[in-house]
Image (tube, rainbow, N blue to C red):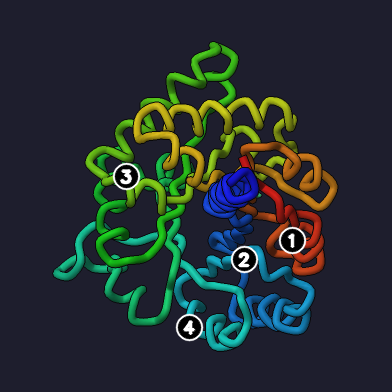
Amino acid sequence: MYILTTIILSLSLFNIIIASRRTPIIVANWKMNTNLDTSMHIANYLLNNKNSINNDMDVVILPPLPFITNIKNVLDNTNIEIGSQNVYHQSVGPYTGKISVFMLNSIGCKYVLVGHSERRLLCGETDEDINMILKIIHKSNMIPILCIGDTENERDLKIQNEIITIQLTKNLHGLSREEIQKTIIAYEPIWSIGTGISMDPTMAQNMHFYIRNWISSRYGYSVGNNIRLLYGGSVKSTNSKELFKCEDIDGFLIGTSSLYPDEFMDIINSSVKLNKVN
Ligand code: PGA
């Protein structure tokens, strides 16, 4: 009887551990950089180095829209997935220049970035727009990577948690628990993006812990425990290891460094943590 109880207990503990493992994910956001030649150069470098990418991790490339199909063709037989940097919240119609989820689905995109601070600031995307975009991405069975972040001024005023709470509340409004758990959230301190100065790992961990706790308290422990949280902002091979050690950071959203394929591969290889279990 004692042995049987011990076996059952160990099995359920094993199940809990397996169930709560979060797969690390590294996302490359090429933004409005590269041309077809340089895009293909990076993609071919990744193809030639695909065997060094750990199977227990997700790697996603977000090329500029005109090159998505080219890049996808190069990386088709690898475990590197392709996504879009943007999508519109309407699915079809007279919206000149906009991109729909149907278009992205039809060319094999699996992920879509939404709410990047550059789109919030430069393109005027509001929290309400972002909420509508998140909903249509989920409806179309792609995976959204939602960016949230605070400015230097907001941090100086010590209101960063309030700012993040407002973004989370408005952006995730009306999503089901399943949709929220499937959403990947990238926290990016805006002052750090593209500056070469990344956030101190302890500060980054504090913010990711805050976000995970907020999700848990609102949507339940399991959703909070399983949702994947990324850090973004001047990630390089020289700081990725320390940042990745943080308990609540499950990967990175990378801009500049993703344009240097050897640097990008170094970050991928320094971010393997098979036992990211809470
Ligand atoms: P960065 O960009 O890595 O160049 O700081 C990050 C981002 O904008 O997602």
Q: Is mark 4 within 8 Å of ligand 1?
A: no
User: Of the residues shown, which amino acid type is indicated by label 4?
Assistant: Thr
Closer to the eye: label 1 or 4: 1
User: Of the residues shown, which amino acid type is indicated by label 3?
Assistant: Arg
Question: Which residue appears farthest toward the left when viewing the image?
Answer: 93
Q: CA distance from mark 4 to mark 2?
A: 17 Å
Going from N to C along the chain, the mark reached first, 1 or 4, is 4
Residue 50 figure quarter:
bottom right
Q: CA distance from mark 4 to mark 3?
A: 32 Å
At a point 44% along the width and 35% down the height, the residue shown is 221
Q: CA distance from mark 3 to mark 2?
A: 24 Å
Residue labelled with disc 1: 268
Q: Quadrant of the C terminus?
A: top right
Q: CA distance from mark 2 to mark 1?
A: 8 Å
User: Of the residues shown, which amino acid type is indicated by label 2?
Assistant: Val
Q: Residues within 10 Å of mark 4 (few under 14, many from 20)?
A: some
Q: What secondary structure is marked by label 1?
A: helix
Residue 206 placed where, x, y %?
Answer: 63, 25
Residue 53 placed where, x, y %?
Answer: 73, 71
Residue 120 placed where, x, y %?
Answer: 40, 42
Going from N to C along the chain, the mark reached first, 2 or 1, is 2
Q: CA distance from mark 1 to mark 4?
A: 23 Å
Closer to the eye: label 1 or 3: 3
Closer to the eye: label 3 or 2: 3
Residue labelled with disc 3: 177
Residue labelled with disc 2: 59
